[in-house]
Amino acid sequence: MTAAAPRRSSRPPPPAPEVNFRLELPLQPEWHNVDLLRLAILNCLSAVFGDPDLSESVGIVTSELLENAIKYGDWAEGKSRFLLLTVCGGGHEVKVEVRSPISDGSPHLQRISSTLEWIAHFPTAREAYIARMRAIAEQPERSGESKMGLVRIAYEGPCAIEAKAAPDGVMQVRATIPTVRGEEIG
C-alpha cells in the first residue's frame, strides 16, 4: 500500500537485528512530550539498527501517532491521564503502537477507519498523499483538520496502519514499518 523512498545503495540492507523493547510511560498529554519521545525513539533505533533513514521513519510515525492520541484522546478529569507507547520489532519490521483513552461514542475511531479506507482505495500511499495534498490546497478555507497525518506516515513511513477500540475505553493505533525497503506494503 505504500511507496518506499529509494535507498542510497543499490544493494538492499540485511534484515535488522531482533529488537524488542517496550516503553510504558505515564505520559501527560502535553505537546512538548511528543518531540522528546520522537527524539528518544530516533536515537535508540539509530544506535540499534545503524540506519538513520529507518530511525527517522520510525520517529516520524511515533510523533504523528502521539500527536493524534493527544489531540483526540479523552483527557477529562477522573479519566486515565496517560499514553502508552510501545515500539518493538526487528528482522523485517518495527511496530509502533500508541494507546490512549477515548470516550464512549467517540467519533475518532470512525475518522481513523475512514481515513485508512480512503488510503486503501489508491494503488499506492504516494498517490493517496498527492491526492490529500491537492485536496488541502483546493480548500477555500481551513477547517482546522487536514486529515494529513495518517496519509503522511502511510507514505513517508512507509507503513501499514491499523486502529481499534478496546473494550476498556482505550484506542489502539498501530503502524508497522518495514526495516527492509523497496517493496510496497499491501
Image (cartoon, rainbow, N blue to C red):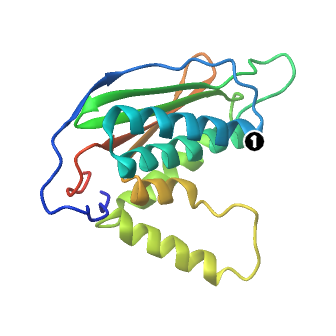
| Foreground pick, 149 / 112 | 149
- In the picture, residue 119 is in which quadrant? bottom left
The amino acid type, in three-letter code, at marker 1 is: Trp
Residue 24 vs residue 43, the one in the foreground: 43
- Residue drawn at x 34%, y 43% is 177
Residue on which disc 1 sits: 31
State left or right for residue 3 relative to residue 98: left
The outermost residue toward the right is 77
User: Where does residue 29 sit, x and y in percent of width and height?
Assistant: 75, 32
For the view shown, which residue lies furthest in the left direction?
Answer: 11
Residue 110 in sight: no
- Indicate the position of residue 6 as horizontal and vertical percent values: 27, 65
Residue 155 appears anywhere in the view: yes
- The x and y percentages for residue 28 are 76, 26
Horizontal side of residue 107 vs 161, given as left or right: right
Tell me the residue at 61%/35% (across/down): 37
Q: What residue is at 19 percent from the left and 61 percent from the top? A: 9
- Within the image, what quadrant is residue 179 found in? top left
Residue 164, compared with residue 14, is above or below; it is: above
Q: Position of residue 69 (x, y in %)?
A: 65, 37
| Left or right, residue 177 beside residue 81 | left
- Identify the residue at horizontal 15%, vertical 53% (top origin): 12
Q: Is residue 6 left or right of residue 77?
A: left
Q: Quadrant of the N terminus?
A: bottom left
- Compared with residue 140, is residue 67 higher up or lower down, i.e. above or below? above
Mark 1 Cα shell of 10 Å, populated few (<14), some (14-19), many (≥20): few
